Amino acid sequence: MYMRLSNHKLSVIFRTSVYCFIIGCHLGYAQNRTAAGEPGSLKYVDPRIGNVGQLLEPTRPTVQQPNQLIRMYPQRKDYLDDQIDNFPLTIVSHRLGQVFSVKPDIMPVDTSRWHKRMPYDHDLEITRPWYYSTYLVDDEIQVEFTPGKKTGIYRFTFPQKAVKNLLFGSYNSGRSDFKFISPTEITGTETYHNDIRVYLYGVFSQGGSTGVIKSGKPVSSNETSGWRSQAFITFTGQESAIVFKYAISYISPEQAKRNFESELKEQSFETIKDAAEKTWDAVINQIEVAGGTEAQKRSFYTALYRCYERMVNISEDNRYYSGFDKKVHESSRPFYTDDWTWDTYLAHHPLRTILNPSLEEDMVNSYVEMYRQGGWMPTFPVLFGDHACMNGFHSSIMILDVYRKGLRNFDVNKAYEGMLKNADEATLIPWRTGPKTKLDDFYHEKGYFPALAEHEKETVIEVDSFEKRQAVAVTLGASFDDWAVAQLAKELGRQQDFERFTKRTLNYKNLWNDDKNMFIPKDDQGNFIDIDPKFDGGMGGRDYYDENNGYTYKWQVQHDIPGLISLMKGKDNFEQELDKLFREGLERSKYAFWAKFPDATGLIGQYSMGNEPSFHIPYLYNFTNSPWKTQKHIRLLLDTWFKDNIFGIPGDEDGGGMSAFVVFSSMGFYPITPGLPVYTIGSPVFQKVTIKLPNGKQFAVLANHCSVKNKYIQQAKFNGQPLNTPWFTHAQLLEGGTLELEMGPKPNKIWGRPAAR
């Protein structure tokens, strides 16, 4: 998902990435040494994979417990940066900020020390999901961290006889304060996103002398408040290691201390670290694999780890703060936030319905509560509320998907009410939330979102000046969302809604252009706008598409693939157009193309592996006479773009969105249409995959003779019975079925063809 960057920044990132690709960037000795002794598959998890993006946002090497509030990684530009700014006490939201900085220092305190960057050695850095360590080479300080749920522990080991300072600061521009309530205790408050108070309570392993910055100078004091408050503590004892244990609360200072006492009071660094490691051991080893290369295992298990970065549980003692109504609520169920549904509805949420359905139910229940509190079903729920971002109401698809997979522990009628309200009353304008506008009235009347001609001036003030109308993307996305409303209406026996929304699910057809064999924007008079769908539409194609061009959006009809095939005049033409997608040239240099479409990374022809709308496209060959082409392309994409190194993600990973594609595809199947409890088969990279299901059963994929070379399915069985179609159901998976594939080096062009069904 595209973050707004200037052309200069894009150029710098591009040059840096190319340079490092040429010279090579290795993953260091300390990391490998640590991983070698870890149990089960944990040794394959390397949070640094993908830490340098091709053009845009890299993966985040978060140190946290799965789906928990406390998240940490050192603040630096990216993995290639050999200097650290400071260390956060928690990352509040994926890519949306952090609170409370801390940094060790050995020099006399002055204001410049807060800004001094700290060089470190990559080969002396250890990053594991539950533990972080680095060595600050200039000051010879060892920094270690391990996470609890609402708590964390830092351990700073200073050189002997050095001055030992810890400097505290804030990241956000609102008011903040620090107070040393004793020589060993600190409290603090930081204002996040203008109006959210985040509270700190911490304890040091030894007492120190305290100070703050006032009027630009350090003074001896135990408290400070204002804008960007800064405080420090100096330790003079003989012990070189200073342990800082702390808790965070979004509710109150008192709750921060209660979080501390319930999690940390009697716990050591080692006991918290060991407990966090055991937690990760349980979730990572829920999926066991055999065969495959070491690199494939590293890519697979690291992707699985990233699927637990979000959503995060922000409940504290059966209470939680909600940014949707700015109130504290009581609830015996955990409340989860920090989700970017445009990215996660495709594969991330569907993966969780398999691995932890009760957790997914709690997350969907959180969406329902957000609707109760804020009045709209959210799209990008974060701590401060719904972060209006991207386009569409894909939470509707997510809710339909879990319902059809048997998840019922949420108020489905209330969820449907929210879906219906969004569909009928909310604006479709990208990056906006709230009631509908005249553009939405036009959509509901005419069945498509109207576009402007190139260089035509915008007349609707609600349209974002950068994000534009995205008219084709909005129309296609709304058709899928409306399909979800229609299908849940059918499940709930709401026949009138079902019939009304079923008609709306076909709105995508209103923009199909037979001459260009593509979805093309129309103006408000119903005329197609003459564009080059490869390149027109401004930055990211946002006038008409979104982050990708017309070649990607040609396939955005997951909810009605037979209808899309019909638009292309049959499955033979459909297959030929898929072939063309992977072979079509850019007609310009890559740098010219990427200057306008920086999200379209991981290119093979016009196919962009680096952006979420492309995930399902290789699997569409399973609807043609050549399912073997799905097997071919999935292996090519995994082998090419998901390497086990710092460049190992082709685009914006978005906290699990792209990683879930890697997990599914590596196992050999994929949920091509969220909302339909069916999986389509690809090409597994392992000889055996075993998923330990929460119901006590196991689902297995056996790929006999599978290897880097043997990627094609020769024949298949499900539970011992011949399988001649590239599909199986969620119900079959939950029953603990076994999918058995015979793999070979050349395609079996008969297996899986519609004629064999």
Image: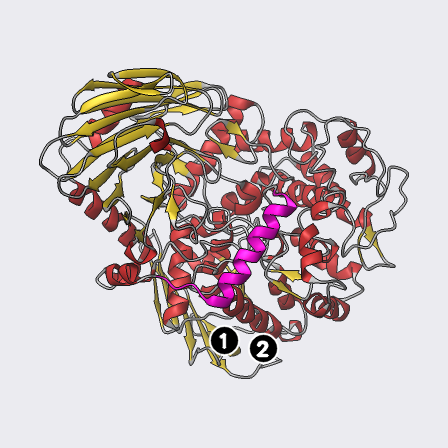
> Does the magenta run of residues contain 9?
yes
One can see residue 277 in this view: yes
Kind of residue sitting beneath label 1: Ala
Q: Is residue 349 above or below residue 629?
A: above
Q: Position of residue 193 (x, y in %)?
A: 48, 25
State the image coordinates of residue 183 (x, y, percent, origin top left): 16, 22
Amino acid type shown at disc 2: Trp
Which element type, helix, strand or loop, lies under badge 2? loop
- Residue 334 location (% of width, % of height): 36, 32
Q: Which residue is mark 2?
A: 751
Q: Are marks 1 and 2 in contact (CB under 8 Å)?
A: yes
Residue occupying image coordinates x 58% and y 81%: 747
C-alpha distance separating marks 1 and 2: 8 Å
Q: Quadrant of residue 499?
A: top right
Q: Which residue is mark 1?
A: 716
Measuring 44% from the left and 37% from the top, which residue is drawn there? 363
Q: Number of marks in the image?
A: 2
- The stretch in magenta equals 5-27
Choose the circle earlier in sequence order: 1 or 2. 1
Quarter of the C terminus within the rendering: bottom right
